[in-house]
Image: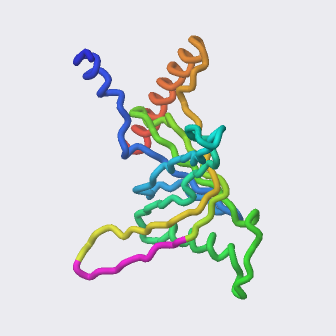
């Protein structure tokens, strides 16, 4: 590989710290996940079974089932209002009532969008988790010997996920249009941010 070509590509690599998370829950629960500091885009595994066409012959592998991972952990920094914890507690309390009668799943399912952002701050990869709900509301530890920022980890269960790419092939004209509109959007966002935050 040409070293100069490799060096020119270093400026286009994405970094782990550029992401956005959005939560959509029942009864209007919604969070942009501004304080979300950690999440992992889940894996997808196709499990296989082996079978042989003849009893003494070699085996072949065949797709048997798709496993989407099933759970994802989100870590939040907590502010003075504990808003993120409040929303998760509200979501969990909606799953069952005070007599511990459970709602129908369709009543408490939500969705989570995880977006990997490019260097221009615009999404390049978007994953939507389907049929989500919070299963584990993590503990919040208190310690008088430290002034670290308070964090909360929440585990969500989900059934499956789907993804979309910003740079999906659309032909020469479509690719040029996407590239041009992306540059304009990036410049507009920067100007608005500069005006708002000085």
Q: Nearer the viewer, residue 61 or 106?
A: 61
User: Height in image: 125 above or below 47?
Assistant: above
> Where, quadrant-wise, is the C terminus in this rendering?
top left
What is the x, y in percent for residue 66?
Answer: 62, 48
Q: Read off the magenta span.
A: 136-145
- Residue 139 magenta-drawn? yes
Instruction: Determine whether, in the image, residue 14 is placed left or right of residue 54.
Output: left
In the image, is 54 to the left or to the right of 139?
A: right
Where residue 164 appears, as percent x and y from the top left, is 59, 36
The residue that appears at 69% across and 86% down in the rendered structure is: 98
Relative to the observer, which residue lies in front, 168 or 67?
Answer: 67
Image coordinates of residue 76 in percent, x first then y, are: 44, 62
Which residue sits at x=42%, y=67%? 78
- Residue 99 in view, yes or no: yes
Vertical comparison of 143 with 76: above or below: below
Majority secondary structure in the magenta region: loop
Q: Nearer the viewer, residue 52 or 145?
A: 52
The residue at the point 58 percent across, 38 percent down is 57
Q: Which residue appears farthest toward the front when viewing the image?
A: 56
């Amino acid at each position: 590989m040409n070293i100069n070509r490799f060096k020119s590509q270093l400026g286009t690599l994405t970094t782990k710290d550029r992401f956005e998370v959005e939560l959509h829950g029942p009864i209007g629960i919604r969070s942009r996940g501004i304080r979300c500091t950690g999440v992992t885009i889940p894996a997808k595994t196709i499990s296989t079974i082996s079978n042989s066409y003849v009893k003494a012959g070699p085996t072949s592998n065949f797709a048997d089932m798709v496993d989407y991972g099933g759970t994802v952990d989100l870590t939040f920094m907590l502010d003075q209002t504990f808003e993120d914890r409040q929303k998760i507690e509200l979501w969990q309390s909606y799953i069952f009532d005070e007599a511990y009668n459970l709602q129908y799943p369709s009543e408490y399912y939500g969705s989570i969008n995880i977006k990997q952002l490019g260097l221009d701050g615009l999404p390049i990869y978007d994953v939507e988790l389907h049929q989500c709900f919070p299963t584990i509301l993590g503990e919040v530890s208190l310690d008088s010997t430290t002034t670290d920022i308070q964090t909360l980890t929440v585990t969500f269960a989900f059934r499956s996920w789907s993804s979309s790419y910003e740079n999906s092939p659309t032909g020469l004209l479509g690719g040029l249009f996407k590239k041009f509109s992306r540059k304009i959007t990036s410049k507009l966002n920067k100007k608005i941010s500069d005006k708002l935050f000085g």
